[in-house]
Image (cartoon, rainbow, N blue to C red):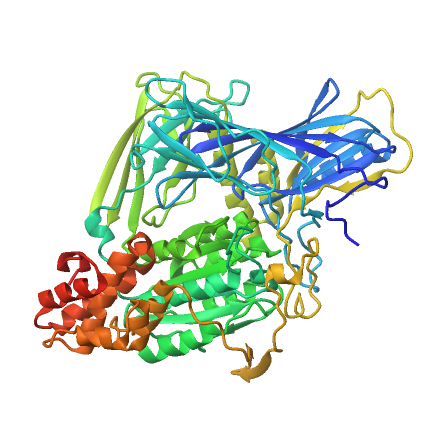
């Protein structure tokens, strides 16, 4: 029987992690995060605690220390195997030791081992990491402190995997969090998914502010912070001084420059949408998709939300494009052998299959469907757009990212992390390597608005032909540390790092010119920067630059394009020099000055991390795969209602699973309306449409103006209803409405003004023809 409070001692005492304290130092677009974790050994024997926990995927861990009583032990960064050996030697000899290492398989999972805590002893572990803040669709900078680490599905045949996580449905530790923001831009506001104290400005210009998480927060869900600046699209260039103790010419010894590029898309560009493309939707159908989106009232199942989203997507596609839908779990299937032309027939066939999609495909193996998709030839003049929906529980994250990157020139990848605990390494990594955009659907977020925002990005022009030109005095050279940027979407920002080498005897300033094209229109920005900054602002930018170089080297090493051992040595050298973590290094700290050694066998305890309660469906792992289970929950909570067994058929060498049961009818009037639209954009006049309007079929028919036909009348009414009754959801139905307006214009109907007036009278609206776009 699993105790609902998670891991306990032999005497049923709480686990040793007592509290977490976090301090954020935000500077413009980057943040330094200091987390302190307090452990207490409340048992009667020496203890080793193991804590597997999530960090943001792009975080660079740059400090690790432990305070035992009044003594502080600062860990050193070493080659990973050397650090592990030193830790094992220290623990086996009775010395206190601390080890922090990144997972070999996923850069957003870390393992912390706390060795040889004496009975009753306190230890405060401090971890510091730096990271870039991601940009959201509303221009906010987002920081997320993950509380949830979902189990990563591992196939039975694989020996690799993310370390096992002990789970708990009640977390026995609390969180305190403080935030300080310093910016060259004026701070507009700061919001959070958790209660905050009021924001306090420390200067008249509103460029310096602090805020705290309200007291007593129990760390049982992700903490999300959204920071808004006033002049979000203004490019910036920030120079950070090198470390005085570091060797000149080295990355840490020279000044490093960070450029922020966040292009603004004018309204005329935003309104121009492409009608071509191949749209491939890849949907996670593993057992974990049969859990709720959140634990609030009226929460949807994840798979149901995905079905509703696919309905909107299918109705929003332009006529003449190509599309296909894949489902994956332990195996995968596609609706069509290859992408098909979007028409009334193909859309109808896809919708019928979407209605029967279930979370019934076992584990989470995304690599094989991606390989299959990439093996399919692309259609000329129809750029491939890949939309991936997953709760992100895969074990081979880096292998997946390498595959996406290797096909970056043939497609763009838009990724969606569903539910708390989705792997940030996987979701953000796929979008980054696929030159796309990542979205996370957590808490009470609805999936549809975020997905339709990304569809708009996919249909809009992009910023391309990006170039960076430098103007520096004689004696100074610039070395780019960031990989080249191919494209930027609306809502995407790029941070570019460069090292300033050499000395200038004269000019104290340099300049950088950023050029790019947006819809074939050239844009130029020139920024001035100081070659020798006078203020020492820490090493955040240096460490993030080093992290960028390390990640590029890791990718090169995995791709096998050069001598692996030489690259590994370069990674370890740069990691140790910059003091930032990598997959080949680890932080090790040993208390060699302890007054007594510890004798006797160590108890090992795993500190619980909250996980969404779940069970695997359809065999739970496909062919004997292993899934680490959370605390058991009542079946109804995860939507595991008993259903008829699925039937299997074979098509084209693939196994096709279908469910015999019919889905429940749509209850949301918006989705009912959307489901009735034809692929061309029009609606038919019938009883089902009248029901959406709250009318009878005869009421709707009798009000039809004599000079317009039924389909034009029905389509005008649908548009009036959308703008009158669901205006707050416009981001979801914007493409549906654009198709409808385009269809009406193509019909060139007579008496359209009268038609709109009569429609407003019938539905109680006040919408004009201009608003409807007809």
Residue at left offset 80%, top offset 20%:
593
Q: Nearer the viewer, residue 256 or 436?
A: 436
Q: Nearer the viewer, residue 165 or 200?
A: 200
Dividing the picture into quadrants, the one containing residue 155 is: bottom right
Q: Nearer the viewer, residue 255 or 452?
A: 452
Dividing the picture into quadrants, the one containing residue 585 is: top right
Residue 644 image point, x, y percent:
61, 77
Residue 525 image point, x, y percent:
25, 36
Going by the picture, which residue comes out furthest to the right?
600
Q: Quadrant of the C terminus?
A: bottom left
Is residue 382 shown to the viewer in this render?
Answer: no
Dividing the picture into quadrants, the one containing residue 71 is: top right
Residue 221 image point, x, y percent:
57, 43
Q: Nearer the viewer, residue 501 or 759?
A: 759
Left or right position of 597 against 55: right
Left or right position of 216 against 473: right
Residue at left offset 50%, top offset 48%:
443
Residue at left offset 50%, top offset 59%:
300
Left or right position of 215 against 477: right
């Amino acid at each position: 029987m699993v105790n609902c409070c998670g891991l306990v001692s032999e005497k049923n005492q709480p686990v040793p992690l007592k509290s977490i304290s976090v301090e954020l130092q935000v500077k413009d677009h980057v943040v330094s995060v200091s987390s302190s974790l307090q452990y207490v050994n409340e048992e009667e024997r020496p203890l080793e605690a193991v804590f597997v926990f999530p960090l943001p995927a792009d975080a660079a861990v740059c400090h690790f220390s432990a305070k035992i009583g009044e003594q502080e032990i600062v860990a050193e960064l070493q080659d990973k195997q050397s650090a592990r050996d030193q830790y094992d030697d220290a623990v086996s000899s009775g010395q206190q030791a601390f080890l922090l290492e990144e997972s070999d398989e996923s850069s957003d999972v870390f393992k912390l081992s706390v060795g040889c805590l004496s009975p009753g002893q306190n230890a405060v572990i401090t971890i510091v990491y730096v990271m870039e803040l991601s940009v959201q669709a509303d221009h906010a900078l987002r920081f997320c402190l993950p509380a949830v680490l979902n189990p990563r599905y591992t196939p039975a045949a694989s020996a690799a995997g993310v370390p096992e996580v002990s789970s708990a449905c009640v977390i026995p530790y609390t969180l305190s969090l403080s935030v300080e923001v310093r910016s060259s831009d004026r701070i507009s506001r700061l919001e959070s998914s958790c209660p905050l104290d009021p924001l306090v400005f420390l200067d008249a210009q509103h460029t310096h502010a602090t805020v705290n998480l309200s007291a007593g927060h129990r760390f049982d869900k992700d903490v999300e912070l959204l920071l808004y600046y006033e002049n979000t699209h203004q490019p910036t260039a920030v120079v950070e001084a090198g470390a005085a103790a570091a060797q000149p010419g080295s990355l840490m010894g020279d000044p490093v420059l960070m450029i922020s590029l966040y292009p603004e898309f004018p309204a005329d560009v935003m309104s121009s949408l492409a009608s071509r493309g191949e749209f491939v939707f890849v949907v996670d159908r593993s057992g974990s998709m049969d859990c709720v989106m959140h634990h609030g009232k009226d929460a949807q199942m994840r798979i149901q939300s995905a079905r509703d989203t696919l309905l909107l997507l299918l109705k929003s596609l332009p006529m003449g494009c190509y599309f296909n839908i894949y489902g994956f779990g332990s195996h995968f299937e596609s609706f069509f052998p290859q992408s098909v032309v979007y028409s009334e027939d193909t859309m109808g066939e896809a919708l019928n299959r979407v209605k029967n999609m279930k979370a019934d495909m076992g584990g989470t193996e995304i690599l094989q469907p991606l390989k299959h998709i990439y093996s399919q030839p692309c259609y000329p003049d129809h750029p491939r757009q890949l939309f991936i929906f997953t709760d992100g529980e895969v074990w081979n994250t880096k292998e997946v990212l390498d595959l996406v990157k290797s096909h970056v020139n043939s497609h763009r990848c838009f990724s969606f992390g569903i539910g708390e605990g989705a792997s940030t390494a996987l979701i953000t990594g796929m979008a980054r390597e696929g030159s796309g955009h990542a979205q996370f659907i957590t808490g009470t977020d609805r999936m549809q608005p975020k997905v339709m925002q990304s569809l708009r990005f996919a249909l809009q022009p992009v910023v391309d032909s990006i170039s960076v030109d430098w103007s520096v005095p004689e004696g100074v050279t610039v070395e780019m540390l960031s990989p080249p940027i191919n494209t930027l979407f609306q809502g995407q920002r790029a941070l570019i790092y460069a090292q300033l080498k050499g000395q200038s005897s004269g000019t104290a300033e340099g300049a950088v010119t950023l050029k790019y094209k947006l819809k074939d229109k050239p844009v130029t920005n020139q920024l001035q920067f100081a070659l020798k900054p006078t203020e020492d602002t820490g090493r955040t930018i240096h460490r993030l630059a080093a992290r960028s170089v390390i990640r590029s080297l890791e990718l090169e090493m995995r791709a096998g394009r050069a001598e692996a051992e030489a690259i590994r040595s370069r990674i370890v050298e740069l990691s140790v020099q910059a003091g930032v973590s990598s997959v080949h290094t680890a932080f090790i700290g040993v208390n060699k000055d302890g007054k007594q050694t510890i004798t006797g066998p160590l108890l090992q305890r795993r500190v619980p991390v909250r996980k969404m309660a779940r069970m695997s469906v359809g065999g739970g792992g496909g062919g004997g795969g292993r899934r680490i289970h959370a605390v058991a929950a009542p079946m109804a909570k995860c939507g595991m209602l008993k259903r008829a067994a699925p039937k299997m058929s074979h098509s084209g060498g693939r196994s096709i699973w279908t469910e015999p049961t019919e889905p429940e009818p749509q209850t949301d009037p918006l989705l009912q309306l959307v489901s009735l639209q034809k692929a061309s954009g029009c609606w038919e006049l019938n009883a089902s449409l009248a029901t959406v309007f709250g009318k009878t079929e005869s009421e709707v028919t009798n009000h039809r103006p004599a000079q317009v036909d039924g389909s034009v009348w029905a389509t005008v009414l649908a548009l009036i209803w959308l703008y009158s009754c669901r205006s707050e959801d416009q981001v979801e139905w914007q493409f549906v409405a654009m198709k409808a307006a385009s269809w009406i214009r193509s019909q060139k109907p007579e008496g359209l003004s009268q038609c709109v007036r009569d429609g407003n009278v019938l539905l109680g609206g006040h919408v004009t023809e201009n608003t409807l776009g007809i």
